[in-house]
Structures are given as structure tokens and as C-alpha cells.
Image (tube, rainbow, N blue to C red):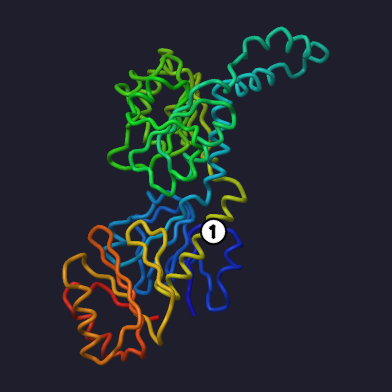
Amino acid sequence: MYKILKLNEISDEINKIFDDKYSFTVDAGDDADGIIVRSYKMADFNAGKRLKAVARAGAGVNNIPIDKMTRQNIVVFNTPGANANAVKELVICAMLLSSRKVVESVDWLKTQKGGGDDVPKAVEKFKNQFVGPELSGKTLGVIGLGAIGILVANAAIGLNMRVLGYDPYLSVDAAWTLNNKVEHAKDVNTLYSKCDYITLHLPLLPTTQGMINKEVIHKMKKGVKLINCARGELVDNNDIIAAIKSGKVAKYVTDFPTDDVLGIENIIAIPHLGASTPEAEDNCAIMAAKQLKDYLENGNIVNSVNYPTAVLARSGSSRITISHKNISSMIAQAAAFLSSESINISNMLSATKGDVGYMIIDTDSEIPQSTIDAMRKIDGFLQISVY
């Protein structure tokens, strides 16, 4: 029986993935085999001895202490792309809100309550103050062409916008899904200077924190509209507020409100609604559950942020996985040791990521516990699991 700890409310759709070999708990003190989490901050979380994996039902993993989990040989999964459509739709909404003064007009209209028959007259008299441009024919810059950025770029092409995309790490697979009308900006500074709208779709890293600052804003067109549904810390709030007040930036729409941006004219703060759709929550939960189950039952790893991708169809009588230091001779030592024990390897896969190496080994016969115990003493082997 596997025990799964839920640190947040998770969609009931996971019950369709986990069968009767699984039970759930919400008690953080329990020693679980796996964890499913959304926004719960795990910095001070004490992992039990049985914990093998943490699955984040979402793309961002800033709430999970990755280095700590890696030191404890715990695989951390996320679900890139599962909420992409939900975020894409909010980005398009944000672009419209930044143009058409919908928020301002709705707020103004509330002040007309009680005006009776004079309300339509007031609407006709004052609606001109809420005039805003159309998206069609304007230029959008998309910084980051991952799952969400590509959907946004493609949708903007459908809205008859010119789209410049910038991503120095664009994968071949991602490029295949990108509309061929999206122009590849080889230089991000070119994108800054040409775009009427700019939307951010980047992870929060030491190299991206505060990347939108006064120096970068200076390179943008006057009156640019900036959309941030990625991570709040990508934008320096002090600098964006100054740019808004000077008129350099016409509108800033953020899905990550903080106290300093609230109540600032021409800043529209949305209460982190990017993935807040029932469809996205279900998709993330299902994806996280499938990845966690496949790892607990088969040792397969997909979409891990700290371990390499490693998927091998099962063959033979037994399977072991070996987490090890990414140093030479690890594979040779595993194969030689099993051979010395007269255990034949029917199939094997090895992969590495950073300092971590990972092997999946299927054998033609059961592996005695004494063999597993002996292998655990090999220098460089961090953890061995039997499936």
C-alpha cells in the first residue's frame, strides 16, 4: 500500500489515477511515500524516511526546496503545460484590459448607481474617456517560448497581430508547434524597441529576477503595455511604478499583486488567477498523479526538475533503480556487480542531470536482498529502490 500526502486541496480527478493500492492523508506528520502539492511552502517541511517523490500540480516549484530534496534523494516533479491554456487565456484578457480601459470604465459606471434614467445619458457623455486601441495590427513581443508562450504567440497571430518571439533556448519540439508567422527575435533588445505589447513567460531564476528594470524599460517604446502572468519577481516594482508614472509604460498588468502596486493608476493587479480554472486544476492534478504513480510503481521519471528523464518499458523478472553521483564508472560498477552475482541484465537505461545520475535496470531473475544491501555500499551510489 502506497500512502500519498496531499499538502493542498487537490482535484478529485486523481482518484481515477490512483487505485486501491493507494491511500491518502492530509497529516504532514505521516510518513508518506509520495506528496502532491500546489502552493504549500515546503521550506521547513520534514521529509519522512519513506518519502520518495514530490509532485507539484503546476509548473512553478519555488515553494519546494529543490536542493534539500535532491540531497535526500527525493525526486521532484512538476506539470509543465498542464495549465498552459488557462494562463494563455488570461494573458489575452490582460492585453485587452491594458488597451480598452474596461476596468476603468466598469469602476466609473458603478459611481452612476442611483442615476435612474440619467444613466444612459451619462454613458453617452463620458464613454469617450475610455477609448482604447484594438490589438489588431499591433506588435506583441513574447519573451519565453515554452508551453504558454507558444500558445500566446499563436493566439495573437489569430488576432491579426505581428508577433516577435524571443527564446534563446527554444527546443526543436516547441518550434514545430509555433505558428510560422511568428518572427524570431534573435536579440531581445530588438524586441523591446519594436513592440507595443510585451508579455513575459519565463521561470524565476537568479538570472531572470528583476530582469524588467529601469535600464530595460528605457529600451522600450513609449506607451508600451507590459503583461506579467509568469512570476512577479521578474519585474522590479519600483522601476515599473516610476515608468508608469512617467508615461513610458502605459499599462502594467500583473497576476502577482503586492501591496506597493495596488491602487497605482494604470497598474492592473489580478489576484493570481492564471491557472485558476477547473480545467487547469484537473489537468495539473491528473498529470502530477500519473507521474508520481509511474515513479512509485516503475521507477520511471518524466518532468522532474532535479532528476533526469528516464523511462523504460518493463521487461524481465525484477527491476531496480539506482540514484548515484554523476561520476565515471557508476554504470560499469553496477553491471559488473550484478554479473558477479550471476544476475543477467535484460534491459538497462542510464541518464544524468547536473550532479545526479540515474539508472533503471531490469533483470532476468529476482535480485536477492543480500545483493541489494551489498550494492548500497558501493561508493557513489546514493539510493537503490526495488520494484
Q: Is residue 295 above or below residue 129?
A: below
Q: Residue furthest right?
A: 117
Residue in view at x 32 percent, y 56 percent = 66
Q: Residue furthest front?
A: 180
Give the residue number, with chain letter if any, for mark 1.
285
Q: Which image quadrant is residue 201 in?
A: top left
Q: Label 1 crowding class (10 Å Cα cut-off): few <14, some 14-19, many 20+?
A: many
Q: Position of residue 236 (x, y in %)?
A: 35, 29
Q: Nearer the viewer, residue 343 or 59?
A: 343
Q: Position of residue 10 (x, y in %)?
A: 55, 59
Q: Nearer the viewer, residue 31 or 218?
A: 218
Q: Is residue 265 above or below residue 353?
A: above
Say what secondary structure mark 1 lies in.
helix
Residue in view at x 48 percent, y 70 percent = 293
Q: Is residue 36 above or below residue 341?
A: above
Residue in view at x 38 percent, y 43 percent = 170
- Under mark 1, the amino acid is Ala
Q: Position of residue 31 (x, y in %)?
A: 41, 73
Left or right of 134? Residue 239 is left
Q: Quadrant of the C terminus?
A: bottom left
Q: How many marks?
A: 1
Left or right of 37? Residue 106 is right
Q: Nearer the viewer, residue 29 or 385?
A: 385
Residue in view at x 68 percent, y 17 percent = 111
Q: Position of residue 248 (x, y in %)?
A: 41, 15
Q: Which image quadrant is residue 353 in?
A: bottom left
Q: Residue furthest top?
A: 125
